[in-house]
Amino acid sequence: MKNIKDNIYAFIDSQNLNLGIRDQGWKLDFLKFRIYLKNKYNTTKAYLFIGYMAGNESLYTSLQKIGYILIFKPTLEIRENGKTKTKGNVDAELVLHTMIEYANYHQAIIVSGDGDFHCLIEYLEGKNKLLRIFVPNKKYSSLLRKFNDYIVRVDLLKNSLELKKTKISGRSKP
């Protein structure tokens, strides 16, 4: 049995990460990100909180194959200004699972720039269980500014984490 000191868990708000990176004009390679977390921080488990949408099963399967543990949230279709938006807010699930797993990890990495996680991050820091906070870009919540010593900006890792297109087919690698 592994010693708890060996366990670093990542809890990832997939929508906050994905949209924050896409706002920068590039796409995150989730395989490279998982490898980065494992190699740089010895992350043993990476929980990816994601809204479930029928038809995306191949995406979910590929994310599981590369080492993510998926936690699904049902999505809602919301009409705003004549457009339909899909919403799958995962905040409560991320907090809940971080606490369910609390006794199983030595330290946690929270991946989100959302200020809604302020109380969770503050709690983890107070218990010496916070390793890092990954934010997608410089536009993260001002509520997280007091944790600047823990912040890692994913946009500054673009060169090593960007999804590259293959030259042969023009399609993205899996």
Image (cartoon, rainbow, N blue to C red):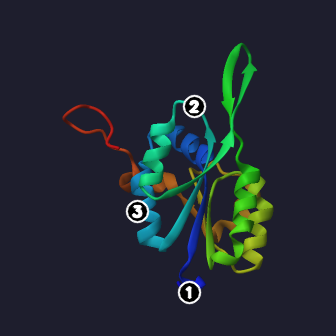
From the image, tell me which residue sits under label 1.
Answer: 3
What residue sits right under mark 3 in the picture? 35
- From this viewpoint, is residue 25 visible? no
**Number of marks in picture:** 3
Note whether 79 is above or below 34 in the view shown: above
What amino acid type should be assigned to the residue bearing mark 1?
Asn
Tell me which corner region of the image, top left, top right, bottom left or bottom right, holds residue 79: top right
The mark closer to the camera, 2 or 3, is 2
- Give the CA separation, mark 1 to mark 2: 39 Å
Q: Secondary structure at mark 1?
A: loop
Q: Where is residue 84 shown, x and y percent of the image?
A: 68, 20
Q: Could you say where residue 118 lies in the image, as x and y percent from the top left? A: 77, 60
The amino acid sitting under disc 3 is Ile
Which of pointers 2 and 3 lies earlier in the amino acid sequence?
Answer: 3
Identify the disc placed on residue 54.
Answer: 2
Q: What secondary structure is marked by label 3?
A: helix
Question: How dense is the environment of label 1, judged by Cα within 10 Å: few (below 14), some, or many (20 and up)?
Answer: few
Residue lying farthest to the left in this orientation: 168
